[in-house]
Amino acid sequence: MKLQLSRAILVAIVFVVISLVSLTYATVEAINYGSYWDARSQLTSNVNRLHVETSSTNGSVTIQTTVSATNPTDYSGMMVRYFELRLYFVKLGSNQTLFSGDSAGEIIDLISTDNAPVGNPIGPHSTLISVLTLHLSPSRSDAFKAFYQANPAQVYGQTEVRAAVDSFLDTVLGPEIVQNDQTVPIS
């Protein structure tokens, strides 16, 4: 017994299969969209590490900051456009600061460039990490070393990290800016 399908039945079967695939896709996307607003409100950004290194050859200071953006929800469809870091140094328990901007506007601004994962997705329940590196000028290197030597083990970084996160609503709402202010120990 040979099963032969007429052209009309074959077209109908193909149409049903395509319809089921489309329905499944639309259902998955609708469920994902339902998580969007929770994800937008629960995104976080952090400074995970602040590392300062002094060159043994020329005495210049390099600052490496590990920053992250976290999506603790089920939503998929967000991407980091950039990280931005503002940084100055404080002596704990006092009002002594370095590069705080109170006199000459010297707050250190660092925007992620090619060493940061621009355009990388933040998947559901995941964290995107980037390392931002800044080489201080000779005068700032000298100022940092003097401040740190005068206050050993008491100097912390006062940071403001911002992650600009893109989604499908950017053309309407713009990117979500996730900001966090932290006092971070120097490692």
Image (cartoon, rainbow, N blue to C red):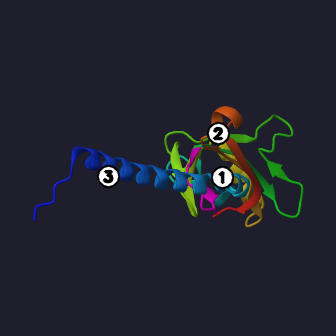
Do the residues bearing badges 1 and 2 touch, measured as CB atoms within 8 Å? Answer: yes
The picture quadrant where one finds residue 49 is bottom right
Question: Which class describes the residues within 10 Å of circle 3: few (<14), some (14-19), or many (20+)?
Answer: few
Q: Nearer the viewer, residue 88 or 32?
A: 32
Name above or below for residue 47 compared with residue 109: below
Name above or below for residue 154 compared with residue 178: below
- Residue 163 in the image: x percent, y percent? 65, 47
Q: Secondary structure at mark 3?
A: helix
Q: Is residue 177 visible?
A: yes
Q: Residue at x 59, y 44 (%)?
A: 134
Q: Amino acid at mark 1?
A: Tyr
- For the residues marked 3 and 2, what is the alpha-carbon distance in whole angstroms? 37 Å
Q: Which mark is residue 169?
A: 2
Residue occupied by mark 1: 36
Q: Is residue 116 visible?
A: no
- Residue 173 in the image: x percent, y percent? 71, 37
Do the residues bearing badges 3 and 1 touch, measured as CB atoms within 8 Å? Answer: no
Q: Nearer the viewer, residue 169 or 8?
A: 8
Q: Amino acid at mark 2?
A: Leu
- The total of numbered circles placed on residues is 3
> From which residue to which does the magenta span run?
68-80
Q: Amino acid at mark 3?
A: Ile
Horizontal side, residue 24 vs residue 43: left or right:
left
Q: Residue at x 78, y 61 (%)?
A: 151
